[in-house]
Image (cartoon, coloured by chain):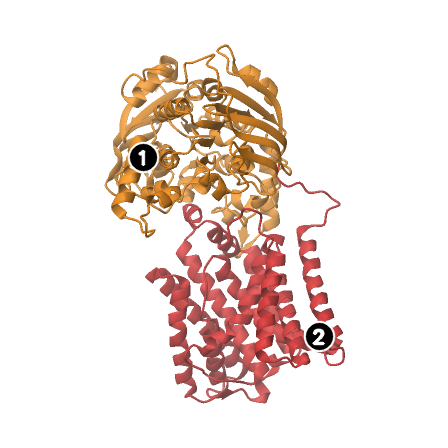
Chain colours: A red, B orange
Amino acid sequence: MKATKEKTGKKLSAKTGGYLLLILMVVVSWGIFKIITPDNFGSPKNMLSYFEASLLAAVGAVGFYFVMVMGMFDFSIGANIMLSAIVGCVFATKFNLGYVGLVVGAIVTGALVGLINGSFYVKLRIPSMIVTTGLALIYESVANYIAGGVEQTLPSNLRAFGQMPGNLILAVIAFAIAYLLLNYTKIGTYTYAIGSNEFVAKNMGIKVNKYKILAFVISGAFLGVMAVLTISYGSSMVAVTGMASMSRNFVPTMGCFFGLAFKKYGMPIPAIIIGEFVINIIFFGFIALGAPTAIQDVITGFALLIIVMLTTKVAKGEIVK
Amino acid sequence: MSEIRLQIKDVSKHFGITRALKHVSFNINKGEIHALIGENGSGKSTLTNSLAGIYQKDGGTFILDGKEIHPINQVDANNEGISIIVQELGTLDGLTVAENIFLGHEDEFVKFGIKNTAAMNKRATELLKKYGFERIKAAEMIDNYNFEDRKLVEIVKATYFNPKILVIDETTTALSGEGREELYKHMKRIKEEGNTVIFISHDLPEVLRLSDTITVLRDGDYIDTVKSSDIDEDGLKKLMVGREVSGEYYRSDYGEPVSDEVVMRVRDVSVPGIISDISFDLHKGEILGFGGLSESGMHEIGKACFGASFDREGSVTLADGTKINNIPTAIAHSIAYTSKDRDNESLVMNQSIRDNICLPSLKKLSNKLHLLSDRKLKKFANTYAETMSTKMQSVDQFVSNLSGGNKQKVVLARWIGKDSDILVLDSPTRGIDVKVKQDIYHLMDKMRKDGKSFIMISEELMELIGMCDRIIIMKDGKINGELMRDKNMDENVLIEKMV
């Protein structure tokens, strides 16, 4: 009888290996575009702005990770961000609540959307993908109603979270909270337990439905923070309908894939943050190249598949669904 | 007279129309190892799962030390002083060893909502050291450990808080000799501390050796409670089955020549890190046994012969020259395989008995337009489920609702229905009662006489000695000996080559 895996002092720890892999990805993606378009891409200043842009989605992705790691999904991410941003903006401007209205309004709205998502999913016993798709349509309509069909603009005196250091401070606080929840509270342990085997988790006295709803609430609150960063960075938000908000789902979801892929290294949150940075490097690389949007999407899609394929390392024989 | 620890009064439980427990009543004393035996589907696990909060009973009461208890989950049962080690895997991926040990009991490490991971790891390390499992690291992800090590973690999890009652549900079959000895040691310790062990096992000599008292259940009914010292194996079999278990248990023939016709030729097969340079021939009508410690690599042999091993080197060739390199080729050429890990690798749990039995035979069962008839599938499934005497309501019942032994019958029914010529059976009688075992042995004997060939991988040495024409012993991934069928062979000859 022996442990299937033996550690030696000389071997790199899983975490160090994971970090090296992520840093390698940053260097490779930067290197490729720097070689192709050396003049208008990849200067230290440029890299800092790519990183700033990546913070937005990274904040949403760390929250969404709680939902995904439990084996659930959320198609209403985009609608949530849009609705939370509009409510935050309305609170800040029309109710003259300033930054408090913006931040609290957006986070509470996000959490409320999460609560509705989780409650509907648990009570109706409908797959999370279907529930959140249906609800996304409703959130879009509510956002459109609140905005009165008009683009909501955040005045320049309320955009501190759209630039350094405001955006960085808010994002770091969000990451720290996510890290704390995941590693130093029961919520984190139960999140992984439910994701691993819901039946056994239930038998261990874990209130599975409560923690599933909580995961949606946490995810929603982080998407609320992402909404604050998004409207502060872009200065305005348009309430689109007809599921057009789905386009906002893509980037946070991609970051979440990084988190899931690097879970085995014990570093999902750093993986999400650096992963979103890599995605942004690729994205801005294409812009620097002047590549058409369709080509950008095709190559970004392939890049995602390659990155996840290379990092996931599914054991032979392991079933992938 | 011993003091009563647990009174089980009139306990009933239904699953749909199946009456799993029918007004069961008996007492369990303090400071004893109380075995619970019965055929598959007799209600043993249902009773203990109800006691441990995994199931909710429909009627009756559990009275622990004079107080009525109603555990609603395992943690609740733990708080009442009851813990359980389940038959299948009870630890969770994605969590560390320490998190698994204290799952549901994190509160002792939480202050102001923040979990003290370092303190939890320290406490788990102390416990692992105390149990002699130092090589299992508290902070390591449980995913990094094998099935047996994870069972050892479950032993720690179930016993560290000195439960009043520990239920061990058919756990020993998942453990190697060393692991079993560890478990026995802790059972003895619990008993000596004045607490109680409820021990479920199909291994009757083990039951007689370890337990003080034995309660027998049959088809959900309470049959009897006897002192281990007052009964023998045959007496227990009679109580379990309800009649004398007559006739031979294993094969009775000796000296019968095995055909020279080779049906499968295995040459230089290696799977990195598991087995190396394995070569043997399987003959027509032969039962070829593989024995060894659970980590010896013998379980990989079955997978390698079925084309299910990854990174396999070497060749597996049939008599007609067909190379078996993948599972579809194996099935198409009449090879069957049953895994030791029945629930995860052999059965589609959330599908009906019908679907499970018909799965590899769908081509044969479809018409010219490749359409399937529900009636035909049902008839086919019924025929083979009944051949195996599967206890079920109908073939539409979900496999997940069956007992361990009946699940195994479904797996075997599937391959008998497929009319496979070569059957690779890995631990075919794991967790199976004496009557079903006898049925399986008789079936193998009959099929052998009909020219079917078997590779039988087993950790039960008596089974290998009783059933096989030839036994290959594995050690450290290599063949360490080969023994021919012999009336005078005993376990020690095999053990010598295993360790």
* Quadrant position of the N terminus of chain A in the picture: top right
Residue receiving disc 1? B384
| SS class, disc 2 | helix
Q: Quadrant of residue B181?
A: top right
Q: Pointer 2: what residue?
A: A47
Number of other residues with Cα within 10 Å of mark 2, as a class: few under 14, some 14 to 19, many 20 or more? some
Q: Do tags 1 and 2 sit on the same chain?
A: no
- Where is residue B272? Give x, y as percent: 64, 39
Q: Is any atom of residue A251 visible in this view? A: yes
Q: Residue at x 62, y 57 (%)?
A: A311
The mark lying in front, picked from 1 and 2, is 1
- Amino acid type, label 2: Met
Amino acid, disc 1: Tyr
Circle 2 chain: A
CB within 8 Å, label 1 to label 2: no
Farthest-out residue, front: B320
